[in-house]
Amino acid sequence: MLIQNRMAFKEWGGICAALGQGIQSVIVRKGGIHEGRQGFQVAHREFWLFPTRFHQGSELLQPAYCDLLKAPIAIEPASGKIMLALYAVVEKVLELKAASTLHQLDSLQVLNQETILNRFEYKTPGLFVLLIRAYQLPQPFQLENETQYGGCRTWVELTQEFPTSNLTPVLTDEQFQQQLLTFEAIVE
């Protein structure tokens, strides 16, 4: 793991809450408007999770997970600050090209089938699925929400580096190993 990092990955606050609670262990990504013609690329293997609130809604989640949007990380901070509480290390990457395999992601993530299918079919069929190991801070870092962080983009370079020394894994090694086995079964 890097000693410090300034790269962040924008993701819905509800998804960040799921990752922080150990309910989810993958990130499903198509790419933002600013990704350009090449679409999403796994440009960094480690990053801070940058919670966003745009375009998320309970109707996009599996019914059992609608309460995630009430988690502190999923709610817009009143102060206009960004709270960095989670760090991710990409363990495996899968590029899904067949819609028939999408239902197999249900146990690894909280989006409903319609949302996953819409993402898959947007522009060119396909999705990236990143198996990540999530880590959490005992106390989040707080930073100003700068204008340069705006827009529909995945990757954000923060104005400073933040240390990773106080991180603890969300899942135990055994729990993560089970998620890895589930992910590898999908790949095969």
Image: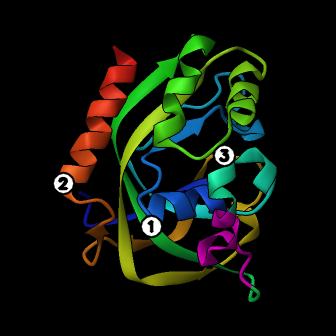
Residue 173: mark:
2
Q: Crowding near pointer 3: few (<14 within 10 Å), some, many (20+)? A: some
Residue type (three-letter) at the residue carrying disc 2: Asp
Residue type (three-letter) at the residue carrying disc 1: Leu
Q: Crowding near pointer 2: few (<14 within 10 Å), some, many (20+)? A: few
Residue at the image point whose x is 59% and y is 81% from the top: 143
Q: Which tag is nearer the camera, tag 2 or tag 3?
A: 3
Which of marks 1 and 3 precedes in the sequence? 3
Residue 137 image position (x, y, % from top left): 37, 77
Residue 82 image position (x, y, % from top left): 63, 76
Q: Which tag is nearer the camera, tag 3 or tag 1?
A: 3
Q: Which residue carries the number 1 mark?
A: 86
In three-dimensional space, the C-alpha distance between marks 3 and 1, rounded to whole angstroms, equals 22 Å
Looking at this view, is 76 or 108 the one in front? 108
Report the span colored magenta. 67-77
Q: In this view, does 77 lie to the left or right of 68?
A: right
Residue 130 image position (x, y, % from top left): 44, 37
Q: Which residue carries the number 3 mark?
A: 62
Find the residue positioned furthest to the left: 174
Main secondary-structure element of the magenta-colored stretch: helix
Whether residue 71 appears in magenta in the rendering, the answer is yes
Q: Is mark 2 on a helix, strand or loop?
A: helix
Whether residue 36 appears in magenta in the rendering, the answer is no
